[in-house]
Image (tube, grey):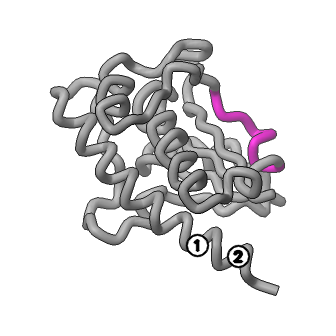
């Protein structure tokens, strides 16, 4: 089983959005039983909290329910559990590098490295912005999810 962890700062906006969007892509590709997906934050600000209500609302407008998710903090142990650990921005990527064991085999990088339709390299934090920010985050995540799914499929098809 391939395991993917999406990571942002507090695990209430971007990374849980990536988790539910990517899970939907996996369902559509009939790979839900082949790829495991979770999300986490680099800080413990919102451990146990549900996703931001604005993130939930934006996702719900696209038919995605994320109300069951709860925030958790990324740990050093995640590097032994996940094949892909993908940060939403450079700051969180650096935070992950700080806790990454030297012998980690996980692919560690920026999630938008898998995007095709957008030139942005980081998923912006919509927390302090207006409601349009959450829709833009969804657009970016949808695009990067397609690219990540292609990458995972290539690995699954390899001998």
Residue 152 or residue 41, whichever sits in front: 152
Q: Which residue is mark 2?
A: 155
What span is in magenta? 73-80
Secondary element at image label 2: helix
On-image quarter of the N terminus = bottom right
Q: Quadrant of residue 41?
A: top right
Residue 42 or residue 34, whichever sits in front: 34
Residue at the farthest top position: 49
Residue 122 or residue 58, whichever sits in front: 58
Secondary element at image label 1: helix
Q: Main secondary structure of the magenta part?
A: loop
Vertical order, 149 against 68 (above or below): below
Identify the residue at horizontal 24%, vertical 39% (top origin).
135
Q: Which residue is mark 1?
A: 151
Identify the residue at horizontal 26%, vertical 64% (top origin).
118
Q: Estimate the x, y position of residue 140 in percent, counting from the top left.
A: 32, 53
**Residue 140, numbered circle:** none
* 97 left or right, relative to 34: left
Is-magenta flag for residue 136? no
Tell me, yes or no, whether the two marked residues, 1 and 2, touch with CB atoms within 8 Å: yes
């Amino acid at each position: 089983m391939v395991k993917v962890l999406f990571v942002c700062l507090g695990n209430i906006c971007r990374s849980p959005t990536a988790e539910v969007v990517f899970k939907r892509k996996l369902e559509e590709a009939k790979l839900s039983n082949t790829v495991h997906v979770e999300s986490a934050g680099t800080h413990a600000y919102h451990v146990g909290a549900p996703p931001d209500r604005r993130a939930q609302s934006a996702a719900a407008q696209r038919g995605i329910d994320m109300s069951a998710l709860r925030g958790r903090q990324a740990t050093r142990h995640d590097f032994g559990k996940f094949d892909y650990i993908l940060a939403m921005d450079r700051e969180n990527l650096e935070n992950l590098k700080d806790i990454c064991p030297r012998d980690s085999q996980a692919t560690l990088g920026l999630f938008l490295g898998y995007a095709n339709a957008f030139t942005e390299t980081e998923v912006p934090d919509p927390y302090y912005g207006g409601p349009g920010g959450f829709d833009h985050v969804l657009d970016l995540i949808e695009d990067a999810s397609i690219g990540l799914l292609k990458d995972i499929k290539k690995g699954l098809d390899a001998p």
